[in-house]
Image (cartoon, helix red, strand yellow):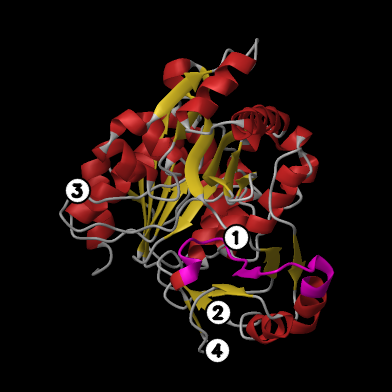
């Protein structure tokens, strides 16, 4: 399958970390900026894209008032959490389903009160579910036809690519695998932008006809304009639908943003909802550290995502289980190393720490200073195994040896993994 189709399926913002063995370690998707559904729809509505009329409620009373204000024939009520599969989820209140249709405004109040303040468990949430704090009340539209539309940055094309399919409302990866002829792509010249010809071509491939053809083309152009405006790396609309009364509507959307554009996208990044994030992940982000908590007992502090994943694999190979994915990054300073130790040592499951550094950009001596400082100030009481290689490594080893601390030095990755696993029983 093409890399484009994988990205369109929303996999670009996920790390699924697998061991070298048959068993896999499932990891919660890495989340930088992630918007709730109502936030994405507001962003689109404010930029000329067609979405359902909606408002957000935090109580049943508010939901009833919104329904009366919308004055629609039918309403759709959606629990707002950062996870898919809401329609088939279960609330701790006993309510089945996080998405409900009703034409009775009063019933909306009762349903909202069974959602807000209760955990919703879906196939994409942790076992205990996620607390629902907001519910979106929207006008319900009938959908006569569903298509798929996405824009993403693609390395192969060295710029944005628009991907569309007349087969929307389903898993786009399955469409790409079984009927690739239904996947259509247009690479956009970043300087010229999307042309009327390109937009119309895509609208035709999505099988819009008559007046809806021009409307769909205009919506495609508006989406591309928004894509550039907010520094998105991907926007996926599924379904990009058609109603029986002749409307083209964005029924659902998923945005990914360029994290490095935070400085010029302050309003967008201010919408970041961190209430569902692992507090350790949020704390790590403050110091430009990439952290994902796992369920093992050997903490990993590594520079570089690829090296971090290889480190977890080799720990598994030697019979251990990683407690986290923690990428210090290429420009880590002494403070970053200290904060990384601070985060992992707060995890009561951590019984050993493996530091695996390959110093290219990173100065190993800087890392060594950070390690000794953290060990002393945090009073680390679990074994710390160190494998350092690269820039200024000899000075780093001298710092570690002269520290007088019971640090365990390793010769290479294999030796480090073995010592980390062995340290659990010593």
Q: Would residue 78 be counted in the magenta stretch?
A: yes
Residue 321: give x, y in percent of width and height: 28, 61
Q: Which residue is mark 4?
A: 93
Q: Which residues are magenta?
A: 67-87
Whether residue 236 is situated above or below residue 23 in the rendered picture: above
What is the spatial separation of the Cα atoms under label 2 and label 3, in whole angstroms?
A: 35 Å
Considering depth in this image, is 359 or 125 the residue closer to the camera? 125
Is disc 2 placed on a helix, strand or loop?
A: strand
Q: Residues within 10 Å of mark 3 (few under 14, many from 20)?
A: some
Judging by the rendered image, the residue that carries numbered circle 3 is 20
Q: Residue at x 57, y 74 (%)?
A: 100
- Kindly report which numbered mark, 3 or 4, lies closer to the viewer in this rendering: 4
Q: Residue at x 27, y 50 (%)?
A: 18
Q: Is residue 411 visible?
A: no
Q: Regarding mark 4 in the picture, which secondary structure is present there?
A: loop
Lower position in the chain sequence, tag 2 or tag 4:
4
Q: Are marks 1 and 2 in contact (CB under 8 Å)?
A: no
Residues tagged 1 and 4 counted as in contact (Cβ below 8 A) = no
- Disc tally is 4
* Residue 204 image position (x, y, % from top left): 50, 26
Position of the N terminus by quadrant: top left
Residue identified by numbered label 2: 119
Q: Using the rendered image of the protein, determine whether residue 115 is visible from the camera's viewpoint.
A: yes
Q: Nearer the viewer, mark 2 or mark 4?
A: 4
């Amino acid at each position: 399958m093409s890399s484009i189709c994988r990205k369109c399926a929303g996999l670009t913002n996920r790390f699924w970390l697998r061991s070298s063995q048959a068993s896999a370690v499932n990891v919660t998707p890495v989340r930088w900026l992630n918007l709730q559904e109502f936030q994405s729809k507001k962003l689109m509505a404010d930029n000329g894209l067609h979405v359902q009329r909606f408002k957000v409620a935090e109580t049943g009373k508010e939901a009833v008032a919104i329904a009366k204000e919308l004055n629609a024939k039918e309403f759709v009520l959606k629990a707002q959490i950062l996870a898919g599969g809401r329609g088939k989820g279960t609330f701790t209140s006993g309510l089945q389903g996080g998405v409900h249709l009703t034409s009775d405004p009063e019933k909306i109040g009762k349903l909202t009160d069974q959602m807000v303040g209760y955990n919703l468990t879906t196939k994409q949430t942790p076992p205990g579910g996620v607390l629902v704090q907001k519910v979106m009340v929207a006008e319900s539209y009938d959908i006569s036809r569903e298509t798929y539309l996405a824009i993403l940055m693609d390395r192969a094309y060295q710029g944005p690519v628009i991907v569309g399919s007349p087969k929307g409302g389903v898993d786009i990866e399955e469409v790409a695998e079984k009927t690739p002829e239904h996947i259509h792509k247009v690479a956009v010249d970043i300087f010229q932008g999307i042309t009327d010809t390109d937009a119309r071509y895509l609208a035709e491939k999505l099988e819009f006809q008559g007046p809806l053809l021009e409307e769909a083309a205009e919506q495609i152009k508006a989406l591309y304009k928004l894509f550039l405006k907010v520094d998105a790396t991907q926007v996926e609309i599924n379904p990009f639908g058609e109603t029986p009364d002749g409307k083209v509507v964005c029924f659902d959307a998923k945005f990914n943003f360029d994290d490095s554009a935070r400085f010029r996208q302050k309003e967008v990044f201010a919408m970041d909802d961190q209430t569902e994030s692992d507090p350790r992940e949020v704390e790590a982000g403050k110091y430009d550290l990439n952290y994902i908590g796992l369920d093992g007992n050997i903490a990993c502090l590594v520079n570089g995502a690829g090296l971090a994943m290889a480190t977890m694999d080799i720990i598994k190979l030697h019979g251990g289980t990683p407690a986290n994915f923690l990428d210090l990054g290429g420009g880590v300073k002494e403070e970053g190393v200290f904060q990384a130790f601070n985060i992992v040592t707060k995890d009561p499951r951590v019984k050993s720490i493996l530091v695996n550094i390959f110093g290219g950009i990173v100065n190993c001596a800087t890392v060594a200073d950070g390690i000794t400082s953290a060990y002393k100030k945090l009073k680390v009481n679990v074994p710390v195994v160190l494998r350092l290689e690269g820039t200024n490594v000899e000075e780093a080893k001298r710092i570690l040896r002269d520290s007088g601390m019971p640090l365990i030095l390793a010769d290479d990755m294999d030796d480090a993994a073995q010592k980390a696993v062995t340290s659990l029983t010593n």
